[in-house]
Image (cartoon, grey):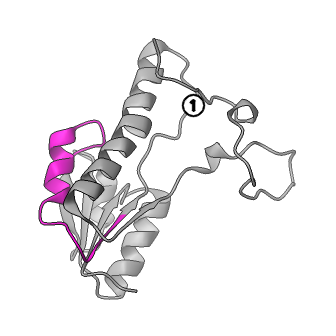
Amino acid sequence: MMYRSYLVTGATGFLGSAVVKRLTQAGQSVRALVLPGDPQAVGLPPAVEQVSGGLDRPETLEALFRGAGEGTCVIHCAGLISIASHTRQGMERLWKVNVEGTRAVARLSAQQGVSKLVYVSSVHAIPELPDGAEMAEPERFDPALVEGSWRSPPP
């Protein structure tokens, strides 16, 4: 099923840019959330309507969702994938973007009555396997098996 319009977060990332490219090649209407000053934004197809903002800025998400409703599909590809930082500030930013930002996208999708919300997570949510082993989505998620995972917001 094709939708009237698509809202895409993470549109300049590896996966998001491929999604945007396919949608625009199919002639679909795409509005994308793009971080201010993101140098990759110039690579987005010209037909893409860009909204400057981020998952950690609720007012920019509201601009992204303006006019959305039935017939809109939200494809949420954005998130921080670096788990290298174990500082309090780094963990707070990860939580704010990945958890609170995703929660805001889901809330706005429901409030606006969008037809479909697709959430795509990072491969970092899959336990690491030995070199050369084929990775696949696990049947059951266990946070204890994922390096860098957490169960609650930072104190």
Foreground pick, 26 / 73:
73
Above/below status of 71 relative to 38: below
Q: Residue at position x 62%, y 30% from top?
A: 149
- Which span is picked out in magenta? 53-74
SS of the residue under disc 1: loop
Residue type marked 1 = Ile
* For residue 113, side relative to residue 131 (left or right): left
* For residue 123, side relative to residue 3 (left or right): right
* Quarter of the view holding residue 25: bottom left
* Residue 10 image point, x, y percent: 38, 54
* Residue 85 image point, x, y percent: 54, 23
Foreground pick, 18 / 9:
9
Q: Residue at position x 29%, y 48% from top?
A: 107
* Residue 7 image point, x, y percent: 28, 65
**Quarter of the image with the C terminus in it:** top left
Q: Residue at position x 21%, y 48% from top?
A: 61
Location of mark 1 (residue) = 83
* Quarter of the view holding residue 31: bottom left
